[in-house]
């Protein structure tokens, strides 16, 4: 007989359906925010352009959340082709008077080295620095929100098993408990429309 199970979505990338937030995402965003804030101090004192690469694989959620929260000048995510155009239009007239922070969400379609090359093509006088945050985003103490999410997901999954449920993923949609069939859970391929609007409003 099959062993009953309820899955709990644990990935910092926040890139699966069936829940608004995955376990680990908020902690990773908070780590990225702290690092970007520190980098901004350096960028402002030396009037440099910093490209900060955050994790996410094919998902721009960490990039959008950390970039908007830190007031980044540009945010590049795998789900959008327009972001690089916005960046190049902004940076072609940059003359080193202020810090300029670009948050780049890693992904096969988005390489920080390629972004550097395109920036140099439109403004060859820029002094560029790259900071790849890497696996530092996966470690450290969990945020309060992730601790609460872990408790809530654990209770939801355990209760579902006791009630005879199986083959589902526990999540929270619109802050309400949700159980989704595991076979219907797929990767998110788009950030939601509200976040895309915010990205255009603040970085377009």
Image (cartoon, rainbow, N blue to C red):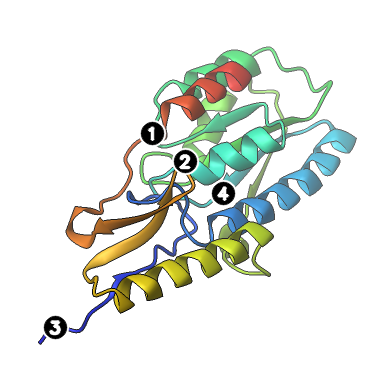
- Residue 188 horizontal side relative to residue 154, left or right: left
Is the residue 145 above or below the residue 47 in the image?
below
Q: Which comes before the other along the chain, label 2 or label 1?
A: 2
Extreme bottom residue here? 1
- Mark 4 Cα shell of 10 Å, populated few (<14), some (14-19), many (≥20): many
Extreme right residue here? 45
Residue topped by disc 4: 54
Q: Which comes before the other along the chain, label 3 or label 4?
A: 3
CA–CA distance between discs 2 and 3? 36 Å
Residue topped by disc 2: 60
Disc 3 element: loop
Q: Which quadrant, please, contains the N terminus?
A: bottom left
Q: Position of residue 103 (x, y in %)?
A: 60, 38
Q: Which mark is on residue 8?
A: none
Q: Which comes before the other along the chain, label 4 or label 1?
A: 4
- Residue 189 horizontal side relative to residue 94, left or right: left
């Amino acid at each position: 007989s099959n062993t009953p199970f309820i899955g709990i979505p644990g990935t910092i990338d926040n890139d699966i359906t069936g829940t608004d937030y995955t376990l680990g995402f908020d902690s990773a965003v908070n780590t990225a925010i702290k690092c970007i804030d520190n980098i901004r101090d350096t960028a402002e004192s030396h009037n440099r352009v910093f490209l900060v690469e955050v994790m996410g694989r094919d998902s721009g959620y960490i990039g959008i959340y950390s970039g908007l929260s830190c007031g980044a000048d540009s945010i590049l995510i795998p789900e959008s082709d327009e972001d690089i155009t916005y960046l190049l239009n902004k940076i072609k007239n940059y003359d080193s008077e202020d810090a300029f922070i670009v948050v780049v969400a890693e992904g096969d379609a988005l390489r920080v080295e390629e972004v550097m090359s395109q920036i140099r093509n439109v403004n060859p006088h820029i002094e560029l620095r790259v900071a790849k945050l890497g696996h530092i985003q996966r470690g450290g103490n969990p945020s309060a929100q992730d601790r609460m999410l872990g408790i809530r997901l654990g209770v939801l999954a355990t209760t579902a098993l006791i009630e005879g449920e199986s083959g589902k993923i526990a999540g929270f949609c619109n802050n309400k408990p949700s159980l989704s069939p595991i076979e219907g859970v797929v990767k998110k391929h788009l950030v939601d429309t509200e976040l895309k609007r915010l990205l255009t409003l603040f970085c377009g």
